[in-house]
Amino acid sequence: MIEGLLDKVRNQKPLVHHITNIVTVNDCANVTLALGALPVMAHALEEVEDMVKAASGLVLNIGTLTPKQVESMIKAGKKANEFGIPVVLDPVGAGATPLRTESAKRILGEVKVSVVKGNSAEIGVLAGAGGEIRGVEAVGSSENLLAAAKDMAKNLGATVVISGARDVVTDGERVAFVDNGHPWMGTITGTGCMLASVIGSFCGVERDYFKASVAALVAFGLAGELAANRPEVRGPASFKVCFFDELYNLSGEKIRAGMKYSIV
Amino acid sequence: MIEGLLDKVRNQKPLVHHITNIVTVNDCANVTLALGALPVMAHALEEVEDMVKAASGLVLNIGTLTPKQVESMIKAGKKANEFGIPVVLDPVGAGATPLRTESAKRILGEVKVSVVKGNSAEIGVLAGAGGEIRGVEAVGSSENLLAAAKDMAKNLGATVVISGARDVVTDGERVAFVDNGHPWMGTITGTGCMLASVIGSFCGVERDYFKASVAALVAFGLAGELAANRPEVRGPASFKVCFFDELYNLSGEKIRAGMKYSIV
Amino acid sequence: MIEGLLDKVRNQKPLVHHITNIVTVNDCANVTLALGALPVMAHALEEVEDMVKAASGLVLNIGTLTPKQVESMIKAGKKANEFGIPVVLDPVGAGATPLRTESAKRILGEVKVSVVKGNSAEIGVLAGAGGEIRGVEAVGSSENLLAAAKDMAKNLGATVVISGARDVVTDGERVAFVDNGHPWMGTITGTGCMLASVIGSFCGVERDYFKASVAALVAFGLAGELAANRPEVRGPASFKVCFFDELYNLSGEKIRAGMKYSIV
């Protein structure tokens, strides 16, 4: 189902427009390039509509949001909707402050989002299932999370991705579990943000966003596993170098051999 | 005195809220994670109070300040004061432009800061001892710097850290010299900013901020020394990778074996 | 002609003031340091004039521009003109949105720029020769580009640099081709931005900006070639580490041995 999508990304080189945070913006650009897609970052209210029109995907990340930036996100999101361009929302820190929770909800209310990707706390908060967050890291989640995420997906007409040791993907009907990934990925900042870039890249070449999200999680997690096996890894920074390299060196063949997911 | 603090950081994982510059924000997040603490970056005036309330430390860095960002810093700083959360100020480039000098002074006037950390020129300018700065790098400092720093510490009721080949720490009474560190650290941008993150992390677990600052300088400098000894180092970028890795791999035992400081 | 300029950068350590984008600002600072110059990043309208006065070069990069940031660029640029400090413009994404095209033109109209550096599409658009751009990457350019760039250089009284597999430099009279460089450089984000920092550093020590630009392109491209030959390179991230290291380890001797340029 998903093995051929990486080649599609590399052949089509989808342009992925990001309105994102200042912490991990460089990593998001490099991960998009390493995968084979083309990143562009632009946030001025005066140009986001012009930029997104040329793109094949839009990634909105509220990691260091301001009210003004949220305006740009909504403007870009509406234009993306008009042109049928997939929108990925990464509601970083939803639940940590009212500004984050309300901004995420406002974007979901005003923009038709294709994929919402968060950790268990962020999705729990937005799905109404609760969740505990410290800063931007989940420290607790509800047992009812999957059911709530399915409802959320149905209500939004979107795919919901809950990232974690075992990732969960649902479009309200289908549910997938992805077990690719490695604990090293949690030792560096921005893996969540980078994952959203990878999802945006796959959505740029595959209109079944559930399938695109599963493919993105598998590719991203497998690159982490392959990197973790490299003899160069001595800590988080050497892991990060290997991780980007392995994403660049990933192939359909490696994905076929290493993918760990199930659809229920 | 300080050997046990690193384990405390790793056990307690203090959340360190940063309002910082766009140049080194990613490095600050990663250095905080590598040490074992939890970073969060948030600067919107509308959320800084909510974010800092959940934190164990606040780091304010004026490296790419705007007047609006300074408002956020003061708002967050006052809230931190209200909750007894330690505040670390990194007055990047104080002395280089009036905006930087005045903003640093304004923050020190309106917020009760726990630690002020700067190079010899930045501290010299703020302590009234003079100092010469090019961009954000000290190129000259006063001979009276230590006495001025002690007075500054007393007046502010704060710990003052002067980073350099030999770091100086004073709370107005005690003075410590720290000789850990390595010249490679000066070849990459942001070591000063990262040091402030490390100080903020230690202050999150140790209420004697003089002691926390000494511990931070020792850990940070020792990681630099250990990294410099790695055979992988061929220049500043490979050094940086090793530096983050060594910070991650640091232990109380390594600190006991390698710490170089004296208190007078 | 150019072999001695790197040593001049290292001896004089020119301060290079950047007003630049949030994506690659850290890389620009580190590349400037690796070369031997001193970076400073400052964008507040309230301080750019004070900062640029102390600098030996100013780099303006519109990669994540806002109208407010463009005001800061123009204010800093005019002050640089007043003090005879060279200004390098990197019109990232000119042609991709009206805001970018118009802002680049406005800067060129209000500030006397010393060097304009862009890819074939950006320069093509600004020189009136046309050009196709996706996001911020050139995907097509005019056959008349060199002639248009020469006219542009003459009209502006500036040096125009078109970066690509074969770089082109012209001041309207002289034309140079630089063939140093390596395809790995295109696999990471920000090589264009970093190149502008390197040009700004060389312009800080050499008033013949045509010559400074050629020297910058040779040094930058040669570092890429030397990095690509390193056995550590397994992908874009390990290449990037080697690239910064090689730039740091560059010497006049290596440049003499490896430079590939011709002036016609």
Image (cartoon, coloured by chain):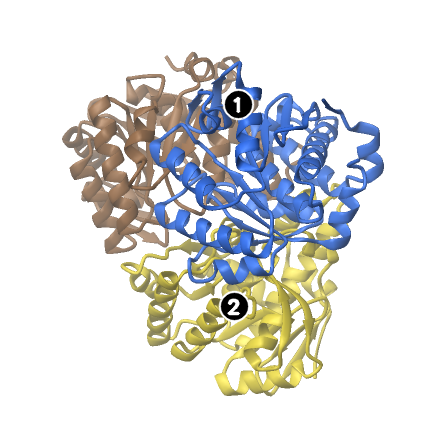
Chain colours: A brown, B yellow, C blue
- Near-viewer residue (B251 or B222): B222
Image quarter in which the N terminus of chain C is found? top right
Q: Position of residue C189 (x, y in %)?
A: 53, 33
Q: Position of residue A165 (x, y in %)?
A: 41, 36
- Near-viewer residue (C167 or A201): C167
Splitting the image into 4 quarters, where does residue A20 fall?
A: top left
Residue type at tag 1: Ala
Numbered mark located on residue C148 in the image: 1
User: Label 2, on which residue?
Assistant: B91
Q: Are marks 2 and 1 on the same chain?
A: no
- Chain of the residue under the numbered disc 1 shown in the image: C
Does any portion of residue A263 appear in the rendered image? yes
Q: Position of residue C234 (x, y in %)?
A: 65, 26
Does any portion of residue A246 appear in the rendered image? no
Image quarter in which the C terminus of chain C is found? top right
Vertical side of B193 occupied by B110: above or below = below
- Near-viewer residue (B115 or C134): C134
Residue C31 shown left or right of residue A16 in the figure: right
- Near-viewer residue (A223 or C213): C213
Splitting the image into 4 quarters, where does residue C219 fall?
A: top right
The 10 Å Cα crowd at callout 2, few under 14, some 14 to 19, many 20 or more, is many
The 10 Å Cα crowd at callout 1, few under 14, some 14 to 19, many 20 or more, is many
Vertical side of C33 occupied by B146: above or below = below
Circle count: 2
Residue in the image at 77% along x and 53% along y: C11
Residue type at tag 2: Pro
Residue in the image at 23% along x and 55% along y: A98
Question: Which is closer to the viewer, label 2 or label 1?
Answer: 1
Q: Position of residue C65 (x, y in %)?
A: 40, 42
